Image (spheres, rainbow, N blue to C red):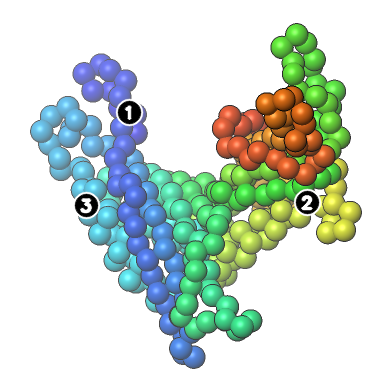
Amino acid sequence: MASQPEGFNFEQMHGKQRVRVARVWKNKEGRHFFVEWNVNISLLSDCVNAYVHDDNSDIVATDTMKNTVYVKAKECSEQVSVEEFAILLAKHFTSFYHQVTHAIINIVEKPWERVYIDGQPHEHGFKLGSEKHTTEVILKKSGVIQLTSGVEGLALLKTTKSGFEGYIRDQYTALPETRERMLATEVTASWRYAYESLSSVPQKPQFFTDRYLDVKKDLVDTFYGPPKEGVYSPSVQNTLYLMAKSVLNRFPDISSIKLKMPNIHFLPVNLKNKDNQTIVKFADDVYLPTDEPHGSIQASLSRFWSKM
Ligand SMILES: O=c1[nH]c(=O)c2[nH]c(=O)[nH]c2[nH]1
């Protein structure tokens, strides 16, 4: 929220970060459903008087914001997706408080998954998976919405069908060109939905959870290619682009996608002993895994116009 106290340009917002909540739902058959969320709230309201004077009368206390997360979780009698929960919080803050003009809600869902015992789904047992489902909702009082979903920590690796050739070679270059290498990354993706107003957001229960799983599958399938033959990657850049393009081609209600794909290096191992005899000669088999330094490659792709 921008304002001009005492002739200055001034921007401010306040909120509560890292509000952790877990919620259990039980169906009639006795099956339990479980989520754990880490919620970040930022509210924009005209509370310049709190900064400039000692007048807090326009402030929603951040402690109140924290309590609201638990009240709203309690009120969700049916299971909701992380996107739906972010939207209902944003709706609450922008409608309940006349002072609040915008709400920004970010949530990261911890990847608890139902456990399977001897192939059978457990009724109330969960284990921690790997990648995390994220969302961001920016809602204005008018109902104008920006809805983004994403995935964090999606670790992917393939042991062949990757190379890197034809790059600038100069006196600083040591890297040999190759058509045979390991390709490993940890994808962070966020995609923006084209829904522009609260009233156009799909209401179907679990719509956004299904969409999250479908987008993730599309990203993963494009990275690997078909199970038998795979697909050759000439660079992380090209693979990233194909992944982003595939998502936009498949999902008309997604208007843009941003991908971060660090190039996590596995270094070939070649070892000589003290007498200069080779004891390990690399043949695309023994690697030194590293996590730093790593290449950092990121891009975003968006439509010129919405397909919806
Ligand atoms: O796919 C790659 N992209 C790069 O930009 C790069 N740079 C590098 O050293 N190795 C690679 N690999």
Secondary structure, mark 1, is: strand
Answer with left or right where residue 141 lies relative to residue 111.
Answer: left
Mark 2 C-beta closer than 8 Å to ligand 1: no
Instruction: Give the mark nearer the N terminus: 1 vs 3.
Output: 1
Mark 1 C-beta closer than 8 Å to ligand 1: no
Secondary structure, mark 2, is: helix
- Identify the amino acid type marked 3: Asp
Determine the CA span between mark 1 and mark 3: 22 Å
Residue 63 circle label:
3
Q: Residue 15 in the image: x percent, y percent?
A: 30, 44
Density class for disc 1 (Cα within 10 Å; few <14, some 14-19, many ≥20) is: few
Instruction: Give the mark nearer the N terminus: 2 vs 1.
Output: 1
Residue 11 circle label:
1
The reply to whether the C-beta atoms of the residues labelled 2 and 1 are less than 8 Å apart is no
In the rendered image, the residue lying farthest to the bottom is: 29
Answer with left or right where residue 35 lies relative to residue 113.
Answer: left
Density class for disc 2 (Cα within 10 Å; few <14, some 14-19, many ≥20) is: some
In the rendered image, the residue lying farthest to the top is: 171
